[in-house]
């Protein structure tokens, strides 16, 4: 299998990565809280992704919280490739509460984001974070204030590029008035298309679009027939076809499927080799 067929994208116009990346949210314990049962196995998944050619890894300080970033940093420190050959993105501004509700609380105050970025940099074991994203816009804080904090961190050399997550076009435009935005990370898949306008804007502005939940958490029923037909034709799985569709849908899409399983990881990477026919793509897109 090779990831070369996924193509490349230049994040911020200068960090070239293969378009099929790896999402590290599932390197934690149950409910995205606490450490996994086997931390070394989790690090092995990250290292194996790198061995397969993946050079773009996405995480967040709220995964664990703090667990995923630490494991990614430890895995890359022991990887067989140079650290600068792997682009790591992380996010701040969302707090994972470890209680019976397992809530995600927004916290976009500039002071919090600045503190969080320094902590993320330490856990990842880097001098500069390649890509730091505002995880969710805090309704109590103007997006301009949150993004200004990230722009200041960029000026200080703490982060290299600024990204956004879970935003609409109007919020993206307001953020772009503050500083250059390298990426947007929104939910998007062959089934979930609510953010088509955001994808269009990213294409217009030359911004990378990272679709989270690229396989809609496995709920692909609305496209079941089309997915099954393509899967049978390509001796593939529904999930692989869903990933192949994303790679063909737009050159700005950077899928980051996540898994804690090496078998699933290899299946995801193999999806880069699938080339859908025009008819298959049309049926999945309609």
Image (cartoon, rainbow, N blue to C red):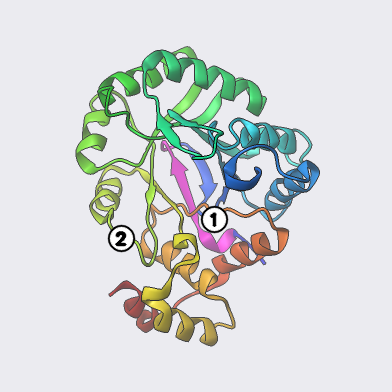
At a point 73% along the width and 41% down the height, the residue shown is 81
Residue in front for this viewpoint, 106 or 58: 106
Q: Is residue 270 above or below residue 89?
A: below
> What residue is drawn where x is 49% and y is 23%?
159
Q: Bin the neighbour count of mark 1 within 10 Å (Cα to Cα): few under 14, some 14-19, many 20 and up.
A: many
Q: Is residue 173 magenta?
A: no
- Of the two numbered discs 1 and 2 on the same chain, state the one appearing first in sequence: 2
Element carrying mark 2: loop
Q: Position of residue 78 (x, y in %)?
A: 79, 36
Region in magenta: 4-13
Which of 231/86 is in front? Answer: 231
Near mark 2 (Cα within 10 A), the count class, few <14, some 14-19 or many ≥20, is few
Which residue is under mark 1? 257
Can you say which quadrant of the picture contains the C terminus?
bottom left
Whole-percent x and y of residue 22? 58, 50
Q: How many marks?
A: 2
Q: Residue at x 46, y 52 (%)?
A: 254
Q: Quadrant of residue 137?
A: top left
Residue 44 at x, y = what percent? 77, 48
Give the residue drawn at x 42%, y 79%: 224
Disc 1, disc 2: CB below 8 Å? no
Quarter of the view holding residue 125: top right
Q: Which residue is mark 2?
A: 193
* Residue 266 visible, this angle: yes
Left/right placement of residue 60 relative to residue 145 reads right
Image coords of residue 43 (percent x, y): 74, 43
Farthest-out residue, front: 100
Q: Residue 25, can we see it?
A: no
Element on which disc 1 rests: loop
Query: Gap in Å between the C-alphas at discs 1 and 2?
Result: 17 Å
């Amino acid at each position: 299998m090779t990831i070369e067929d996924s193509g490349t994208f230049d994040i911020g116009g200068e960090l070239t990565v293969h378009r099929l990346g790896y999402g590290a949210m599932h390197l934690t314990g149950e409910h995205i809280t606490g450490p996994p049962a086997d931390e070394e196995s989790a690090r092995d998944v990250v290292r194996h992704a790198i061995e397969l050619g993946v050079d773009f890894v996405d995480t967040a300080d709220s995964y664990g919280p703090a667990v995923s970033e630490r494991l990614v940093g430890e895995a890359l420190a022991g990887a067989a490739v140079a650290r600068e050959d792997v682009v790591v993105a992380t996010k701040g501004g969302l707090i994972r509460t470890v209680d019976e509700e397992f809530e995600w609380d927004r916290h976009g105050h500039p002071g919090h984001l600045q503190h969080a970025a320094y902590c993320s940099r330490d856990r990842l074991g880097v001098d500069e974070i390649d890509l730091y994203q505002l995880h969710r816009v805090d309704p109590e804080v103007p997006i301009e204030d949150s993004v200004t904090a990230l722009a200041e961190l960029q000026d200080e050399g703490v982060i290299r590029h600024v990204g956004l997550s879970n935003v609409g076009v109007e919020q993206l435009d307001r953020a772009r008035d503050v500083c250059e935005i390298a990426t947007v990370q929104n939910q998007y898949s062959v089934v979930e298309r609510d953010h088509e306008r955001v994808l269009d804007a990213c294409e217009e502005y030359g911004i990378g679009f990272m679709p989270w939940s690229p396989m809609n958490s496995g709920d692909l029923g609305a496209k079941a027939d089309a997915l099954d037909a393509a899967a049978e034709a390509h001796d593939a799985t529904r999930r692989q076809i869903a990933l192949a569709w994303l790679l063909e849908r737009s050159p700005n899409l950077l899928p980051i499927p996540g898994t804690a399983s090496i078998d699933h990881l290899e299946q995801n990477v193999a999806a880069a080799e699938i080339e859908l026919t025009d008819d298959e793509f049309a049926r999945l897109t309609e």
